[in-house]
Image (tube, grey):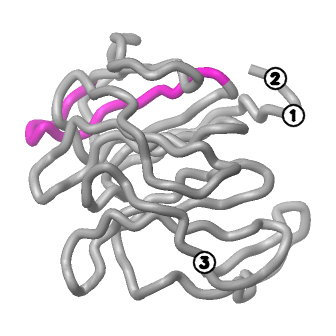
């Protein structure tokens, strides 16, 4: 795990290590206290492991719990609020419609949140403190769908609109920093 201080220019430094060698895992962001990563594709096959680090101190990842379904989820939408980390879709090895979540402040296994409109991998996601938006992806056809959930309440996704063109394997971002924008 590498880290850098965003307010100063410079190279990344060593933060610590994950529990095991892993690729295709997702960072849900966690909150100001914890950084959470989940799932992935280690050499032994798909995993359901959720790991976390305490952001204020360097060190190795610690076991948080398990996803409801083992999947490679760097190919999925991952979002968080101050209290919840949400994981949507991914590959199991086929596309998944599963959305699950954890309460970021307490360790434990993920809980079912709801479902995406269709089994989707390789989507982009962004969130405010209240809403998660998941866009595009592959079902396996590349799609232009934008869908959303309210992070504080479990549900299936609702239609938000459409991207200007179908795409997958891209990133989403938001300027809705909880401390600055509030929503």
Q: Is residue 30 above or below residue 11?
A: above
Q: Residues within 10 Å of mark 3 (few under 14, many from 20)?
A: many
> Which numbered disc covers residue 61?
3
Residue 182 tag number: 2
Relative to 134, say whether 148 is above or below.
Answer: above
Mark 1 nearby-residue class (10 Å; few <14, some 14–19, many ≥20)? few
Dot 2: element = loop
Is 133 colored magenta in this rendering?
yes
Measuring 64% from the left and 22% from the top, which residue is drawn there?
130
Disc 3 and disc 1: Cα gap in Å? Answer: 26 Å
Q: Is residue 160 above or below residue 2?
A: above
- Taking the spot 60% from the left edge, 39% from the top edge, the residue there is 84
Labels 1 & 2 near each other (Cβ < 8 A): yes
Left/right placement of residue 144 relative to residue 182 reads left
Are the residues at dot 2 and dot 3 in contact (C-beta closer than 8 Å)?
no
Q: Which mark is residue 179?
A: 1
Q: Position of residue 181 (x, y in %)?
A: 82, 24
Q: Main secondary structure of the magenta part?
A: strand
Secondary element under disc 3, as helix, strand or loop, is: loop
Q: Are marks 3 and 1 in contact (CB under 8 Å)?
A: no
Query: Residue 83: x percent and y percent?
Result: 68, 38
- In the image, which residues are magenta? 130-144
């Amino acid at each position: 795990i590498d880290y850098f201080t965003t307010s100063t220019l410079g190279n990344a430094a060593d933060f610590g290590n994950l529990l095991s060698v892993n690729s295709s895992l997702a960072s849900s962001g966690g909150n100001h206290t914890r950084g959470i990563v989940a799932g992935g594709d280690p050499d032994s096959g798909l995993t359901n492991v959720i790991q976390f680090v305490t952001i204020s101190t360097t060190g190795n990842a610690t076991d948080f719990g398990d996803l409801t379904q083992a999947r490679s989820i760097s190919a999925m939408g991952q979002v968080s609020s101050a209290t919840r980390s949400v994981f949507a879709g991914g590959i199991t090895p086929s596309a998944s419609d599963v959305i699950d979540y954890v309460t970021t402040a307490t360790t434990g296994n993920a809980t079912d949140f709801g479902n995406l409109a269709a089994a989707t991998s390789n989507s982009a996601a962004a969130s405010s403190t209240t809403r998660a938006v998941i866009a595009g992806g592959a079902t396996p056809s590349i799609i232009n769908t934008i869908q959303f959930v309210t992070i504080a309440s479990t549900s299936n996704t609702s239609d938000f609109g459409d991207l200007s063109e179908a795409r997958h394997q891209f990133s989403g971002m938001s300027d809705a920093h909880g401390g600055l924008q509030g929503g």
